[in-house]
Each structure stands twice: as C-alpha cells, then as structure tokens.
Amino acid sequence: MDTTLSREAAGTAPGGRPVERWTLERGGTRVRLLTYGGIVQSVEVPDRSGARGDVVLGLGSAAEYAACRGPYLGALVGRYANRIAGASFTLDGTLYALVPGDGPNCLHGGAEGFDRRVWRAERVPGGVRLTRVSPAGEQGFPGRLAVSATYTLDAAGALAIAYEAAADAPTPVSLTNHTYWNLNGAASGPAVGSHELRLGASRMTPVDAAGIPKGGTAPVAGTRHDFRAARVLDAGHDHNFALDGGADGGERFAAELYAPASGRVLTIRTTEPGIQVFTADSFAPPVPFGPGAGVALETQAFPDAPNRPEFPSAVLRPGERYTSRTTYAFSVR
Ligand code: G6D
C-alpha cells in the first residue's frame, strides 16, 4: 500500500497566510508536517511492544512555532544551515553581506530563513513535496533559488527528505531538517543520558566558542567526540562531524540513535558530507522542553564552508542542480 495522505487547515502564519498540516502514514509510521517552515511536527513509530509514540519535540500551531523560533523545532533550514562567520562571504570576487543573528554570525539562513516561510504543498508518489522560490537577495544571499523538499515514506515506514534547488546566480546552499529526536517520547524526560548514539564519523570540524570552524578537520579518536562505537549520549554537543564513506553522491551511514527503554532505533543515512549533533543544552523557558530533551541530528554541508576553501564546496552554480537526500529509518531491538 502506498502512503496514506491527508491534509487539513492548520491556522495561519504571522502575516496571515494560511498553513496546512499534512499527515503521511505508511508501514507503522505516521508523520505530520506543516507548510509553515516545512516543520516536522510529529513522527509516531512503534516501540518494542508495538505501542506507537511521538518521537520528536513538537508544538501545536504555526503561531506557537513562530513564537518559539530559537530552537528551530522540526524546521526546514536554509538557505544555508549552520553558521557563516561574520555573516559574510566572498564568491567569485564579490563580497556578500548576510543578515547576522547569532552574534555577528549568520545562523540557519538569517533572521527570516526558510523555517519562517510558508511553502506550497503538492501530492507526489509516496508523500508530499514543498516548494518555494527564495528571491535574489533574500537575507543577503545572491541569486533566485527555486527549492523543493520532498517528504516520503517507504513500505517499511522510513521517512526520506529529498531536497532539490536551482539558482540563476552562484550561491551557497545547504538545506537540512532540524528535528529533535527523543525515541522514548517527547514527554519522557531528557534524551541525553537515556539514549545511545553511534556516528559514522572518524573526524569532526573543531570550532571556537561561537561555533565557528577553526579550520580543517580533526580526528575524534581519544576525544569526547568519539561516537564511532555506540555510547551513552552525554550533554554539551553542538558540533559538526565529517562523515566517513564514499563521496560518490550516494547515501552514507550518518547516525544510529537507540533508546534502550523503548527499544526504538533511528538510523540516518545521507548524501551530505556532515552532521551537526546538538544536544539542546540551552533549552530554557519559554521553550516548553528542558535541557537535553531531544537531540538534533542535522545532515548538512560543513559550517562556514563558504569561507573555508578546504571544506567540500557548498556553492551551487546556474545550470547545476542541488540535490540532497536524508533517510530516517525506524526499527526496534
Ligand atoms: C544548531 O548548532 C546550532 C545550535 O548552536 C543552535 O542553538 C541550534 O541550531 C538552534 O544546531
């Protein structure tokens, strides 16, 4: 059976544009997403006893998400996920100034990023496709960018998010989804301490206190960043890991998150070169979740790649097609 799809009205975004909520169901998985910010609002999957529970941190309405922007709960992040140092970069000899927000740096596409936009939704085989056009100059980024994000479920209930984009001028692009996972359920208490994490990364990108890469990558061996073997997720992670495995455009293993109490396992594979692990240590009211309540696993280009020639390029040029795909597979043990 194909994915069961339904949509309903879900209030309005700031400014009054109507928002839809789409529900996708297949193979034991039920996903709800909003056309506001491409937000993954809930992901319900069975635990080891077959009981279905919501494993992401979510809110109720688009208005609630708009009022609780800081954590980017479940959001589609762009035009450039993570940080660009000094909110500026030089491309083909031209200096571009972006909208800062994280101190002097640009975070997650600027003050009004893709997570604040209402997307157009259409049915596609297996799921729903969101589209929008990011105009030239939006948040300071060059070029008009036509973007799509397609959310599908496969027969086994795995969620795939596939992104595509095309630009009429060279521009950095890095799109991700900012879902926070808690495989014991959103209301179960912290994910930190109760989950085990394994990453397909033997190197990471060292950063300064502002989260800006210092340059190059460093081995995780012998450091607190070593998740090559599964171990209990501890607090204090907000780092990008350089994923091992082929750079042939195919999906590589990124992460496995396991919650022994519920038995749920999340396996993430991606075409992206990096994954940011953020343990939500900074959560505080009015965010209605406590520190460490979930862990964000953000597949992406490396932070500040537009200013770091040694990092894999994140520049999209006219005539090229940006494609990115991440799959989130659910199982139990
Ligand atoms: C990202 O790396 C960043 C964090 O520092 C930020 O606080 C969060 O998004 C909202 O994961």
Image (cartoon, rainbow, N blue to C red):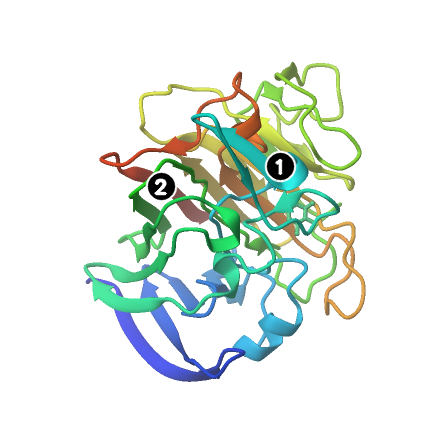
**How many discs appear?**
2
For marks 2 and 1 on the same chain, the one whose residue lies earlier in the sequence: 1
Which residue is tagged 2? 325
Q: Residue at x 32, y 33 (%)?
A: 317
Classify mark 2: helix, strand or loop.
Answer: strand
Q: Quadrant of the N terminus?
A: bottom left
* Residue position for label 1: 197
Q: Residues within 10 Å of mark 2 (few under 14, many from 20)?
A: many
Residues at marks 2 and 1, CA–CA distance in whole angstroms: 21 Å
x, y percent for residue 47: 52, 58
Judged from this view, the residue extending furthest toward the front is 94
Q: Label 2 sits on what residue type? A: Arg
Q: Is residue 234 left or right of residue 300?
A: right
Q: Is residue 292 above or below residue 210?
A: below
Q: Secondary structure at mark 1?
A: strand
**Residue 135: % across, % down:** 38, 56
